[in-house]
Amino acid sequence: MLLVALLALAAVHTAAAMGVVGIDYGTESTKISLVKPGMPFDVVLSRDSKRKVPSAVAWKMQERLHGSDATSLATRFPGDTFVAAKLLMGRSFDDANAPARERVAGLLNTELFASQRGTCEARRATDYTTDKSGADTYTVEELVGAQLSHARTLAEETAGEEFRRSYPGSVGNFGGLDVVITVPVFWTAAERQSMMDAAEIAGFKPRLVSDGAAVGVNYAQSRTFATPERHLFYDAGAGSTRATIVEFSTKTVQAESVISIGSMQKEAVVVDVLSAGWNREASGLALDLLIRDVLADKFTEGHAAKLSKPVREQPRAMARLLKEANRVKHILSANAEASVNIEGLADDIDFRSRLSREDFEALVEKAGLTSAFGEPVAEALRNAKMKIGDLTSVVLVGGMSRVPLVQAALRAAGVPDSKVAQNVNADEAAVMGAAFYGAEFNPQFRMKSIRAHDGNAYPVVLREKGGKDEVIFPQGPFLQERHERKYKDVHEDFSFEVAYAPSSKSKLDTFAPELYRIELVEIHNHLAGLKERGEIEQVDIDLNVTLVTQPLGIYSVESAWLNVKQKPTSIAGALRSFFNVGAQRSEAANASEPTVVVNATDDKNATAAAKPKKAKKPTPTDRSIRIVGRAVSVGSNRPMSGSELKTAKDRLYVANVEMRRRAAKEEARNVLEAYIYRARDIVHDENFGAASKRKERDDIAAKAEELSEWLNEREAELAPTDKLKSKLASLQALVSPVEKRMAEQSGRGAAVRRFTKALEETRAFVVQARANLSEALAAGTGSKYSTAELDTLNGNVERDDKWYREGEAKQARKKADEDPVFKVDELDKRVKKLRDTVKRLASRRIPKTRPPKKSKEAKSSSSATSESATASPAASDAPPKHEEL
């Protein structure tokens, strides 16, 4: 019955809105994908119809900008533009993270300082507060949250549906968009928690998947694997370089949900992330900074005497050089030399130079980055205990994989050209795979079954006081997302730690290995009664704790149960007050019932009906109590508190409302301005002039000029959206009547032809229908039509014909600049009414003709004849007699 109910529930909601959004949030750009029934599986376009959105947010006074609008503002207001915020996620504001901070701060002269949690916070360069209390500040999570909010807006507009606010379920959902965000496989719990906080600020809770696993899912979408294959996905991006070894195989797996279509077992492609290697320093951004610095040096060498201050102390000039460096890097990927031409770089001095690929590669070699690009491959092979020959191929992913020096670094790392493959979309494989990965958790999607087991870069251990470290989540694929642990004889509250294994310390960068302190509380309170009565030794006590990694890489207590069971040697019923909670109330209720005497007799010695006694319920001997389990973050993991999240959400909400208000106002202004230009031009149009009077054209021209002057005034800058729309309506009120006349004139000829044709067809139908009716009456059979219906239809035809002839005569006397007597819509309405009536009558079925009913006398005569024939059957055998006429 449960299966039937769930299948019915699935059938009811199959048509409900649903979908999955994948977000590949990168250091330089963000890609968004959408999978939804009835829509093509593709990336979501930006406002300017690009397939990726720059990962940047900027403020122009109090106006917030995203994407290409933000990057365009960076060269003018670098201190109010924030980029590469991903590199600061989860990092503490301490000396250990100073190099990473300085790298990000030096991009656009960003001012960073410590937040209340000890993480990084950014301050705007300009103070636009009304009370001049200081420039606005934003935590890294708020900066990323604003960008995720923009991605959410783009996805929701494309899908016509909102994001889900809750964490995606494993059974699936019936409405709302699930979200999956890609993260680097090497990200620690602190970095992943920072991303979850940013998503929480943006108003949703996503799944997390490593970019290597997402690319693996995308790779498996269009391929089958008769035998297991192992591929290395080499991803050189703007923020880091990763190498992920993924195994593909085909297995029979258990269906995850009872509402899955088909049997409980099915064949699926299994994607296992075996190992990974990475380098946080080898990145596209590092190459951009190298080129920027060498360009700054060249500019200083040629113009040092003319500069008011060094070019490195001029944020706008350095921002322009950084933008140019990124362009030069892409040119050198396909060319041996790139030219540099920046007008008015600093102090109105133009900068022209050239950079060759040879010089560029020498810079990279000098910085020690050439070998760094190849290190992740060797590390991934070492962690998987494999050799390059064990791999089927090395698939290149990421924009940096196209750079020749990166490919040379791969060859230097021992990757032969025969192993290198470029058979996935290097830019979009991760974001497309992320959406497909999320769709696999929703059984409503009918798609290729792919089971992906993401990778765990750092083994996680459980550490108890005085005990040894026990690995609970080993390095390699996450085959299990839960770890169950049982403790015996637990009488007091206690705690243990969850941390990365000591062997991971060298790969944690500046992050501390300690993750969480798991606190299990209220145990003492629940057992206090047993202790006071001295009964604690009469019971066995077990504590079952389930730890879960959800989202992947973030650990918490899913459940904790205290199981108390009476020992067999204990006195029966001695622990009733503990096990049978509420037993005293039950016994008191039973005692208040009237006593019934069983097998008693009355005065007449009749035996009374016996009433059996109620059997007492046995006293339970075990009890399970839910215990409060808390995962307290320690070390580098510093999540936002509830109050901080609420404040950040409120700030983002206000900013989003203001941004929508500004966008609506800007759109209204643009529409008004475009209509003014159109009105100015249309008064000189020949057709418009023929359909309008001189005064009408003069009024339109005067109104357009008036509104054009008003748009250039201060009042228009401050005018609300409603006033802009009212100004537009005032001009439209003058233009629309003339345009309606033009539309009537152009459409009247075709409408008249449709009308006259409908009259002719209806008349012909009436003639034919009358003939059919006459034949049916003569034959005594049924007919589709009645005389009254045909008369009514014919009357309607004649009235419409008369209305048209009278109107046409009046219309012939009208001029082109006068309103028409009858409109095209009225003609079409009458045509539709006639044709609908004809269609309704013609589609009727001919009613069946019933035989006439016999009279009573005929029935009596028939009965008498039947009786006579029955009474003298011999008479029926005699030949019939013929009477004389």
Image (cartoon, rainbow, N blue to C red):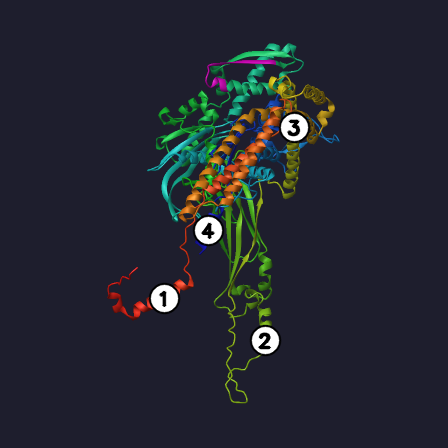
| Mark 1–mark 4 CB contact (< 8 Å) | no
Secondary structure under tag 4 reads helix
Relative height, residue 851 to residue 233 (above, below): below
Proximity of marks 1 and 3: CB atoms separated by less than 8 Å: no
Check whether the beta carbons of the residues at disc 4 and disc 3 lie within 8 A of each other: no
Give the magenta-colored segment's residue range.
Answer: 330-343
Q: Which residue is mark 2?
A: 593
Q: What residue is shown with label 4?
A: 8
Q: Is residue 126 above or below residue 830?
A: above
Of badges 1 and 4, nearer the viewer stands 1
Is residue 52 visible in this depiction of the protein?
no
Q: Which residue is mark 1?
A: 863
Residue 205, image x and y in percent? 55, 41
Q: Which mark is residue 38?
A: none
Whether residue 710 is visible = yes
Q: Residue furthest bottom?
A: 604
Bin the neighbour count of mark 2 within 10 Å (Cα to Cα): few under 14, some 14-19, many 20 and up: few
Which disc is residue 668 wearing? 3
**547 is within the stretch colored magenta:** no
Q: Position of residue 634 (x, y in %)?
A: 58, 42
Q: Amino acid at mark 3?
A: Ala
As measured in the structure, the alpha-carbon distance from the residue carrying label 3 to the one carrying label 2 is 79 Å
